[in-house]
Amino acid sequence: MTIILADRMNQLGSETAFQMLAKAKALEAQGREIIHLEIGEPDFPTLPNVIDRGTKAMLAGMTKYTPSPGLIEARQAIADYIGRTRGYTVDPDEVVMTAGGKPIMFYSILAVVDPGDEVIYPNPGFPIYESVIKFSGGIPVPIPLREENEFRMDIDELESLITDKTKLIIINSPQNPTGGMLTKDDLEKMAGIIGDRNIVILSDEIYEKIVYDGKAFSITSLPGMREKTIILNGFSKTYAMTGWRAGYGVMPKNIAEHITKLVINSTSCLAGFTQMACIEALTGPQDEVRIRTEQFRIRRDHIVKGLNAIPGVKCQKPHGAFYAFPNMKAFGKTSSDMADYLLNEAGVATLGGSSFGIYGEGYLRISYANSLENIEKAVERIAEALKKL
């Protein structure tokens, strides 16, 4: 018997990073040495004080159900942090905690977008944006992020894409996969364009602390914008807590109530001991976060310099996150073929830019969340492999 699935399942995509990881692991099982630059995961460990707080909470019995939007003390810590860094007061009832940042993406689109609604999203961009837009019945409207514009949204082009059917605009700054960042001026122009339109903004700010010059600016800090914006944030990238599965959204209360219903209907709640670890991450010492960002800066400078020294490769210097996005068009291969070639020929796992949308074709995403030694070795291997093309 063949089980016929719902048509909506045909709309869901995936993350190529995990597919490439599986290919790389298969080669490692054969004895090959592979340098992993495909996964967007900090190579640093979770901070000891964070682990200690979570462990103590677990041993103290915080292993039962918690309120679906999160413990009040955890939501208060998030509210205090967002309010302090954005310049306004946040009520803990505007905060919903989830098992990672991705559910906020999923729930927000499901809660806001009706079939036929248009959603503008960055391309190249995190592939789950487009996947969930389609799953919800929405119409994906990609806005190209171009190399000549430092992979920032062109705000005039954004205005041209807005129609009466536009319901949601997704922004991500610092950005995955390019490391591009929207400026305060960009966001002020965007806010002016949106004005009083009935458009919701999903602002993915997960990489906000991994910035190399200045700091990230949130559109919610602009007059009238927090009332129509859902902030997506979490602990995975800044605090190296990917496996803890801890994220959150900050949004108007009426939206938070409905997002909470989606939590109730799916995952019920986030583990209490995880939430206590999150409180420690936000309220504990932040020196190590700054040290790690500086280490990412050093790695960025090395990999960008190394890639640009390879004939035929052009690589802009990213402003944030921990990804390089080199232009590989001179070699005449599709981005997915190039990624496979470098995996098999050089033993370096990267991702083809087309994994992040049609405007990523011709590029590679390279995560420099790896040791400086491995990064330098990877660049040498890539250079040798490209000589053969």
Image (spheres, grey):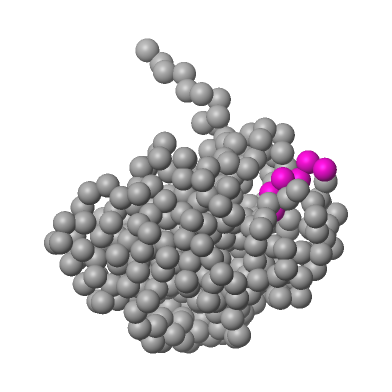
Q: Residue at x 42, y 61 (%)?
A: 75
Quadrant housing the C terminus: bottom right
Q: Nearer the viewer, residue 293 or 226?
A: 226
Q: Residue at x 47, y 71 (%)?
A: 80
Q: In the displayed image of the protein, which residue is found farthest to the left?
A: 59
- Counting from the top left corner in percent of width and height, residue 274 is at 30, 60
Q: Vertically, is 363 above or below 320?
A: above
Q: Nearer the viewer, residue 221 or 353?
A: 221
**Does residue 340 appear in this view?**
no
- Counting from the top left corner in percent of width and height, residue 25 is at 32, 56
Q: Residue at x 48, y 73 (%)?
A: 81
Q: Nearer the viewer, residue 270 or 209?
A: 270
Q: Which residues are magenta?
A: 164-169
- Counting from the top left corner in percent of width and height, residue 72 is at 38, 59
Q: Quadrant of residue 171?
A: bottom right
Predominant secondary structure in magenta? strand
Q: Residue at x 34, y 79 (%)?
A: 284
